[in-house]
Image (tube, grey):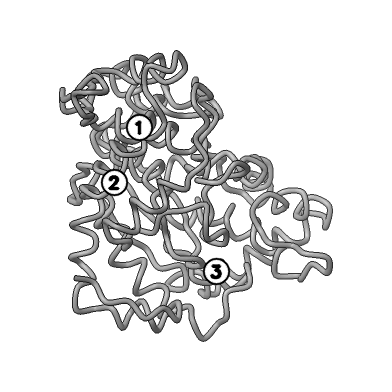
Amino acid sequence: MDTNERFQLIKRNTQEIITEEELIKLLEEKKHPSVYLGTSVTGRPHIGYFAWVQKLADFLKAGFKVKVLLADIHGALDNTPWELLEKRYKYYEIVIPAMIEAMGGDLKNFELVKGSDFQVNKDYILDVLKMSTLTSIRDCTKAASDVVKMGDNPKLSGLIYPIMQALDEEYLGVDIQMGALDQRKILVFAREFLPQVGYKSRVELMIPFIRGLTQEGKMSSSIKNSKIDLIDDEKTIKDKLKNAYCLEGDPENGVLEFAETVIMTQKMDKNEEFVIDRPEKWGGPLHFKTREELHEAFITKKLHPMDLKSGVGVEINKLLAPIRQKFKGKEQIIEEAYGDKIVIE
């Protein structure tokens, strides 16, 4: 794979790269650069995570070393009770590699890093304090505003969050940080302030988030009806999709976005078709080779929302089946982390 092929693979399904020129230079100079994504151990992961997991799989295919920071301390800074951090870390520790494998990623160059393994070290803490003397309350509030749950009476912890996320780039020794579009202000914050404490700025890459199953907003762990959990069974998946917002002919919905971004990317990479079973009396099965074909069929009303939901449900169940199996017999981990009593069949 040459530099342009690697660049195009990394760029697909992204919203913004700061900057593309720096990314190309990095690809020209390094055979195996490194990238990281941080996820705080807060709510239970859902299928929206597949958008960034799929992008990390692209990085692996492009020869990158990939790190996922399971940010337990960040979770506490974003209002996760301290006593639950280790329990939720254990859940994420199982589910994230399982998602990478489900997306076809090779775990050979993949690494999970626990935030508290390095974020309480002396040098790191001194750098946090040093950066806090260079940034203002306004800088940190702005950077954290789209990510941290501030509320009406913001806590100091929310202002520490972007300082630590910036320093993570240096202490993880990576060339790129990746995040969803709502992370943009924090990623720009890192580019501005890392050089002020003597460290280089990195390439920052953002992907769009996938809409939730409700009419407004992204898929979120804190909004029950907006998401499909990674351990939901087949019936639950069908029921959630049945009730999902998906107006005929209107592409602004989470069901179609998931199909285009995740399912069609997987199908196209494998040179497979996305097949939606449909009774013969309604025209028989539908076959889609590209996301453009799928999109066109939906907006021209050749693909009905109920048929789309049915096809998406089948594919989601295929993705989640091996993840559910990872937790069979380990349901206690889920109960301790989130208080949910679940039996996985």
The residue shown at (45%, 69%) is 118
| Residue 274 location (% of width, % of height) | 23, 27
Q: Earlier in the sequence, mark 3 or mark 1?
A: 3
The residue that mark 1 highlights is 308
Left or right of residue 327: residue 218: right
Residue 238 place in picture, x, y as percent: 33, 50
Provide the residue designation for mark 3: 75
Would you say residue 205 is visible in this rendering?
Answer: no
Residue 263 in view of the camera: yes
Q: Earlier in the sequence, mark 2 or mark 1?
A: 1
Left or right? Give the position of 284 relative to 16.
left
In the displayed structure image, the side of residue 209 where residue 331 appears, left or right: left
What residue type is disc 1 on?
Leu
Kindly check if marks 2 and 1 are in contact, taking CB atoms under 8 A apart as contact. Answer: no
> Label 3's element?
helix
Determine the CA span between mark 3 and mark 2.
27 Å
Q: How many numbered callouts?
A: 3
At label 3, which amino acid type do we have? Gly
106 to 279, vertically: above or below: below
User: Few, some or many C-alpha atoms within 10 Å of disc 1 (few <14, some 14-19, many ≥20)?
Assistant: many
Instruction: Name the residue carrying label 2.
Output: 316
- Dot 2 amino acid type: Ile
Residue 176, given in percent of the width and then of the height, sits at 45, 40
